[in-house]
């Protein structure tokens, strides 16, 4: 005997199968969302940990700088803060710290070093006439120098801008100055600073910077050779530069006042980098005076 199919049962079966399939899709979606949320949470935690590691690197550097300053020793390329110890494991990840004294560079805001600026530009293969534009950008008047530019010129540019008429706030600001393009800025960046150094340290400065200040290749060679044997104190510098002018002697110092700390923290594949400027004159407690996140 044949049985008659109940159409209602078929409808119920289809509905049940459809509901089961829908529940499976929802369950799979929920599982994927949960995994994604977990991954995002892990990445967020790693980012926080990496940032904390980078900050700890800055803190350690400030302590080392303070200890060096308390000892009163000259700043040299072999100082504890200057030694590159590479990547160090710490907590959940690692940290790398690199420190440079700003006195190895020529400070564009230092009146006592202004005469060395055109010489440094020439040594770097740049136009010494750019000094006019640098000075016009920072001076308080609106009278342009022969190779410079003032307010009217800058307002006519696209986009318009106005000169600071005050000391440079950062090296990157040089890109706003007439005649300073990306290539010129890249060439200048390793050799100049605006941190507030009044003199250059012959223990750490490059040959180009020393030549711009001392103006005597033989004397610079003596300084470079001597610093390879021992740290140069103030009396050593004076002895190696007999017959130099007072202005040159005042433009040289065995110890700077500002340091740039670059610290990178890493956890897994996540990296966080911070740069800080530390003020640490001899005999004064080190202090972080500027801070910026480079990435992340």
Image (cartoon, rainbow, N blue to C red):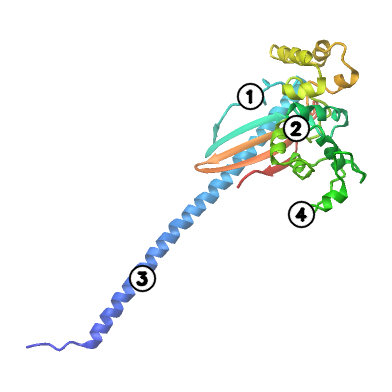
Answer few, some or many: residues within 10 Å of disc 1's Cα (few below 14, many 20 plus, some between 14 and 19): some
Q: Quadrant of residue 214?
A: top right
User: Which one is earlier in the sequence, the residue at label 1 or at label 2?
Assistant: 1
Residue drawn at (46%, 57%), measured in percent from left and top?
36
Circle 4 Cα neighbour tier, 10 Å, few/some/many (<14 / 14–19 / ≥20): few
10 Å crowding of disc 3: few (<14), some (14-19), many (20+)? few
> In the rendered image, which residue does mark 2 sit on?
126
Q: Earlier in the sequence, mark 4 or mark 1?
A: 1
Q: Nearer the viewer, mark 4 or mark 3?
A: 4
Q: Residues within 10 Å of mark 2 (few under 14, many from 20)?
A: some
Q: Nearer the viewer, mark 1 or mark 2?
A: 2
Q: Quadrant of the N terminus?
A: bottom left
Alpha carbon of mark 4 to alpha carbon of mark 3: how far?
58 Å
Q: Nearer the viewer, residue 115 or 183?
A: 183
Q: Secondary structure at mark 3?
A: helix
- Mark closest to the chain's N terminus, 3 or 2: 3
Residues at circles 4 and 1 in contact by the CB criterion of under 8 Å? no
Q: Distance between the Cα atoms at labels 1 and 3?
A: 61 Å
Mark 4 / mark 3, whichever is N-terminal: 3
Q: Secondary structure at mark 2?
A: loop
Residue under the image location 83 percent in, 35 percent down: 131
124 with respect to 134 (left or right): left
Residue named by callout 1: 83
Choose top left, top right, bottom left or bottom right for residue 275.
top right
């Amino acid at each position: 005997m044949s049985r008659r199919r109940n159409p209602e049962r078929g409808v119920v079966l289809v509905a049940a199968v459809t509901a089961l399939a829908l529940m499976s899709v929802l369950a799979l979606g929920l599982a994927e969302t949960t995994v994604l949320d977990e991954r995002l949470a892990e990445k967020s935690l790693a980012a926080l940990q990496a940032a904390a590691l980078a900050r700890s690197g800055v803190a350690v550097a400030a302590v080392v700088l303070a200890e060096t300053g308390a000892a009163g020793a000259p700043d040299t390329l072999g100082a504890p803060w200057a030694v590159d110890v590479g990547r160090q494991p710490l907590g959940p990840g690692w940290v790398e710290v690199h420190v440079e004294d700003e006195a190895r560079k020529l400070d564009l805001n230092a009146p006592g070093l202004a005469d060395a600026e055109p010489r440094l530009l020439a040594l770097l293969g740049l136009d010494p006439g750019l000094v006019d534009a640098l000075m016009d950008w920072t001076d308080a008047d609106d009278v342009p120098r022969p190779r410079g530019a003032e307010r009217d010129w800058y307002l006519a540019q696209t986009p318009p801008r106005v000169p600071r008429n005050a000391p440079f706030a950062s090296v990157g600001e040089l890109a706003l100055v007439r005649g300073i393009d990306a290539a010129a800025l890249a060439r200048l960046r390793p050799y100049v600073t605006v941190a507030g150094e009044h003199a250059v340290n012959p223990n750490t400065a490059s040959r180009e910077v020393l030549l711009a200040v001392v103006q005597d290749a033989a004397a610079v060679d003596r300084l470079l050779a001597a610093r390879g044997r021992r740290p140069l104190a103030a009396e050593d510098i004076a002895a190696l530069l007999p017959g130099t002018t007072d202005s040159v002697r005042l433009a040289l110092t065995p110890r700077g006042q500002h340091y740039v700390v670059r610290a990178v923290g890493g956890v897994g594949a996540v990296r966080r980098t911070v740069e800080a400027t530390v003020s640490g004159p001899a005999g004064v407690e080190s202090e972080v005076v500027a801070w910026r996140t480079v990435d992340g």
